[in-house]
Image (tube, rainbow, N blue to C red):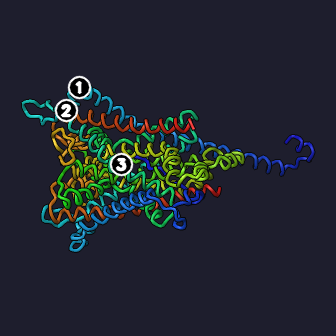
Amino acid sequence: MSIVIPPPPDFTTHEAGGAEFNSATPTRTWYHYVLILASIVFAAVSVGFIGTILWNALPDFEHHTGTLLGGNGWQSPAGPFGGLAMIVGTLETSVVALVIAVVIGLGTSISIVFLLPRRFRNVVATLVELLAAVPSVVYGLWGFLVLAPWMLKTVIPWLNSWPFAKELFGNPGQQDGQSLLLASIVLAVMILPTFVAISREVISVVPNDLIEASLSLGATRWQMIREVVLPTAKIGLFGATFLALARATGETVAVALVAGGVANVQYHLLYPGTSIASWIATEFGEAQGNEIAALMALGVLLMLVNFGLSLISRGLVSRQRKVLAVV
Amino acid sequence: MSDMTELVEPVETGHQMRDEIRSISERSRARRQVRSRIMVVLCALALLVTAVPLVLLLFQLFNRGLPVVLHIGFYTQLPQTPSLIAPNATGGVSNAILGTLVLTLYASVMAIPVGVLVGVYLAESDSKLAATLRVISQTMAGAPSILMGLFAFSFIVRDLHVGFSAIAGSFALAVLMLPVIVISSEIAVRGVPHTLREAGLALGAKPHKVSMKIVLPAAVTGIVTGIILAISRAIGETAPVLLVIGGGYINSWKPLDPVSALPLSIYENAKSEWPSLRTEVWGIALVLVVFVFVLSLSARIWASRKQQAR
């Protein structure tokens, strides 16, 4: 997950390309069949992808669905294999990361579009997209070797100096700095470029007429942004948010490096935890039999969440295109 | 304003009211402007907050990675496990570099032909199959990469009895690249003006000739850009290859041998207890990031230059 996928084309305004491939026309050539064959291969791979994971997860769903969704603790190799810790960990890390990334990312996109001098805009936009391409393992490495010691030395003592912080975040004492909070921070840094890349694009296509109209009515710069730009771009921004969330929930190795890899339900963010994807990655090497099925079942869970999120986000982004087409 | 006051005999109450309105409006404008300034400063601050960790990351990557990558042995030697006698003997990462190249090559061979053809089909057809494939490709494009690893493990490694191998890893990467190539090829082919195709058809060319000789050459920039972006995404993926390539410690290009890869050796060296391996890991990360940056920058520059030429 390191490249921003180009947005889907707007199929409503374009007419589908060649009329020659419509079933009504008789001129079907070998070329047409090659294309169909490739499409069938692609469809088969996709169906095989989903089917294989489902099939391998089936033994676990047959006997242990309750354990998977509600059980705490992961006893390798005999079981039971409880998935609650991973589900909770995934939720915590991705929601915290999303909140950080959306608040900061929105401000960043606004300042790239409205505050930066025109000649810097493209440079910064390209830079952001390059950073979105940095492999996630590099973010994980940085979090593991640089941020974790820094958390231990600076952030945790500072947090603990606040009242109620110990009750809220927990007080891990001397550990190696890996924690759910660190995982959230690394995730936030990682999804920021993705979120900024999309939200910048969404914000920058808000029609100039609207912006100038609001400014001419005496709105200040912030009023223009709040009353005109953000409402117009709202749906697309939600789409970007869901895409960032999908990326955060699916992230594997970065979380595996910094979260600590402890399968306990943990509501205090300073303690180590784990997430669905990173748990699959770290446990799969030594897994046998039933454990493989349980890990596949976790994979099914991850797939459902991710497909749901990406369907929502793509729907929202394409609806935004239609909104702007009307404006 | 001054004309008005001359015309209308100023009444005391009116005066007061006018002053009051004016002062209220001025106060509200001042307040609006203060609020605007505050929010604008906050936005600029957000830009700064975004930039700081990312700049720090890049700085530390170059700062710690450069001393490592300047040794020739880093590229030519096989990795060694440090021992108490020689704690700094880390060897090189030649197997990981070769492994990454081999994995990417095989994955491209599998994914590019199918991906481009499907993209062309989607752009030229509006059948039910095409509509379904469109949804599938957009959903698959965002699927977590670890799932590709699970797929390749169950299908290639276990069911087909191939074992941990380069081909299993490149299959996982190919599944990862496919939807990206499909989507970008479709966009590229759709971007070719209708008039070009119609001119070809009007001259009496067969539809497949028009498609291959006119539409594809016109769309090649977008298609190649999409392919490069897909490759640069696949090169950096750790999760799918982690499960299936086996982490071989030899230089091998054979599809059935276990191989290593740059992201995999980053992951493994980072977790190692040896300080020397933890130093070396920055060099591996630098090589990987340079790979990815060169790929995506060249795609961008090439695309924009072609666009200008047109």
Depth check: B203 or B278 in front? B203
Question: x, y (%) of residue A141?
Answer: 28, 41
Query: Which kind of residue does numbered mark 1 sit on?
Result: His
Residue for badge 1:
B71
Query: Which kind of residue does numbered mark 3 sit on?
Result: Leu
Q: Is residue A252 left or right of residue B127?
A: left
Question: x, y (%) of residue A248?
Answer: 37, 53
Q: Residue at x 52, y 55 (%)?
A: B207
Depth check: A276 or B111 in front? B111
Q: Number of labelled discs?
A: 3
> Residue B250 has which mark?
none
Residue B72 lies, with reference to residue B190, above or below; the image says: above
Q: Could you say whether the residue bearing mark 1 is in a helix, strand or loop?
A: loop
Q: Is residue A99 visible?
A: no
Residue for badge 3:
A187
Chain containing the residue with disc 1: B
Q: Name which quarter of the figure residue A133 lies in.
A: top left
Identify the residue at the far front of this view. B204
Residue for badge 2:
B92
Question: x, y (%) of residue B111?
Answer: 35, 51
Q: Is residue B240 left or right of residue A200?
A: left
Residue B271 lies, with reference to residue A61, above or below; the image says: above
Q: Residue at x 93, y 45 (%)?
A: B7
Question: x, y (%) of residue B54?
Answer: 39, 38
Marks 1/2 in contact by CB < 8 Å: the verdict is: yes
Query: Which kind of residue does numbered mark 2 sit on?
Result: Gly
Q: Could you say whether the residue bearing mark 2 is in a helix, strand or loop?
A: loop
Q: Is residue A232 visible?
A: yes
Q: Earlier in the sequence, mark 1 or mark 2?
A: 1
Chain containing the residue with disc 2: B
